[in-house]
Amino acid sequence: MPDLLPILVAALVAGTPLVYAALGELVAERAGVINLGVEGMMVVGAVVGFAAMMGGAGWPAAALAAAAAGAALALPFAALAVSLGANQIAAGLALTIFGTSLGSYIGKPYVGMALAPAPSALQQAAGQIPGLGVVLGQLHPLVWLSWAVFGGVWWFLYRARAGLVLRAVGESPASAWAIGHPVGRIRYAAVLFGGAMAGLAGAFVSVVYTALWTEGLIAGRGWIAVALVVFATWRPGRCFAGAYLFGGATIAQLFGQTALAAVPSELMSALPYLATVVVLVVISRDEARLRLHVPASLGKPFSA
Amino acid sequence: MPLRIERRPRPSRAMSWASPLIAAALTAAVAMILFALDGREPVSTLWIFLTTPLADLYGFGELLLKAAPLILIGVGLAIGFRAGVWNIGAEGQLVLGVIFGGWLALEFGGAGPWVMPAMLLAGGIGGALWAAVPALLRTRFNASEILTSLMLNYCAQLWLAYLVFGPWRDPAGFNFPQSAPLHPDALLPIVIENTRANIEIVIAVAAALVAWIFIERTHLGFQLRVTGAAPGAARYAGFPVRRAVWIGMLTGGFAAGVAGVGEIAGPLGQIFPTASAGYGYAAIIVAFLGRLHPAGIVPAGLLLALLAIAGDYAQMMLGMPSSIGGLFQGTLLFFLLAADVLTTWRIRRVEDAPLPATEAA
């Protein structure tokens, strides 16, 4: 089945930004903080990563810079939502509005520029591996890194003591505080991790996926990531699978445009957003099950 | 004398109105830092940034032109926010207003003076229908209206793009993605001579008055406020929570739809794929800055309109990207939320009192 390979690769690449962004948001939400600023942090991450590449940095440095930018942007949100106990929905919206504008402000000189495709040495080496090399050789190392992040998040949440504490903070901050855990600091860390992952996700889009910068590049991927966390009922495994499901839907749309010429391309482009709505409805209609999985303190400020 | 932060016995009303002013002052400070980093003289640049747009009557008209949709949508959204309904989809609801009103204008353009009011109504209905989707999904299937209303923004945008790139494209428009110019019957009348300020600002202020009476003086408005402030109490009192969701979503959608018609029947005069200048998102800031109260939303809308116009001028006069306006809008909301903390908390100096006997022992 040689024809399936490019589709598989394309779906994996399209799903990767969602893997990063959704896993980051998942960790923040498991600590009890809902951050609707993912879209804004992704936009800034995309610009910073792209600017770093244009400035001659390699992809690891660009990815690192984007992650740092995402985390830096998450900091004022954390100050509002965690330290000051502000409304998290409003604070997250502020972050998205701010980040989107900041992205266009910084990105102004780069509009319309594109990066020359250059497969990394690592990627070429992986291509030599017998069997798996056919797939691995076509995937950017940042795709592999996203798998490591998934493994790390899963291990952290379910196997590490610190992850247990983080989940406890999300379920019952008062109890966690009473037995001596620094609720505020843990929430800060979770939100900053979410910001770093969103920044990385943005950089993946601008540096690897499209290899160009234009306004509106992120196009709601950050919001889809937030929806994915609900879809995954706050579990990393489902989040990971869901990201590729959406990646696949995006690709199906591209292939569909050639196969179904009669269908307007705009309708095909709307598919990921419509799919998000449908998926949210399917998951949310079972209110009892949703309430079973949602972190009990999600969105509620805590002050000792 | 150490300082102590303590919860106020009840939220301070004075602080709630002072906090937008604090936020505006802090935003101005950030703006000056940004100008200084850009190698400009901060104070005079800020002065130019804020006053140039208002230098003449035409500039004042532009301010009213931009403020009208912000006030209109802000008032509509505030009713929802007061009821605890997070409608983030005003941008898409505005686009539906463009589609519904635009269809009427293209179809019945020169049919008579009834076209323009009918467009406003059709636009409002379009926006309300688009808002009805998240309302239905929330009340029937428990789906978060934040995410569904936001996803529909992208869908509405794509729908409009399809129409303007396809069936609505002007055959005489040199293949540009734009509709034919709307018939003069379909355009909103100008209210101030020699400016572009049209009747929408009057509609917006009237809407603010009606919303004020509705939310503060009617029983239904009271039910909505209680539902937003204390859902448990509302349920206990037998106030229908679902109805609050519906009213909150539909008023926001209707207002946004009318504002959408205001764009094509006002400054644009024809239909473009980018008919909205981000009013749906900026109106969220307007609603919060105006304390979710119609009396506050009118000045808040004027301020945000000033920032938006100043951003455009900054591009023309100072050579800075116009996104700087949006940057300040986001900063303003950040500072507002931070300053709002002072409505429920206060900082007090604690006198050095002698230690209580129990601790001394």
Image (cartoon, rainbow, N blue to C red):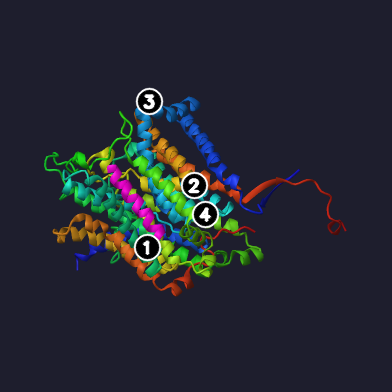
The answer to whether residue A141 shows anywhere in this view is no
Q: Position of residue B175 (x, y in %)?
A: 14, 41
Determine the CA span between mark 2 and mark 1: 35 Å
Disc 2 secondary structure class: helix
Q: Residues within 10 Å of mark 1 (few under 14, many from 20)?
A: many
Residue B288 is a magenta residue: no
Badge 3 amino acid: Asp
Image side of residue B337 versus residue A257, left or right: right
How many numbered markers are drawn? 4
| Residue designated by label 4 | A87
Badge 4 amino acid: Asn
- Chain for disc number 3: B
What predominant SS class does the magenta segment belong to? helix
First reached walking from the N terminus: tag 3 or tag 1: 3
Determine the CA span between mark 2 and mark 3: 41 Å
| Residue designated by label 3 | B56
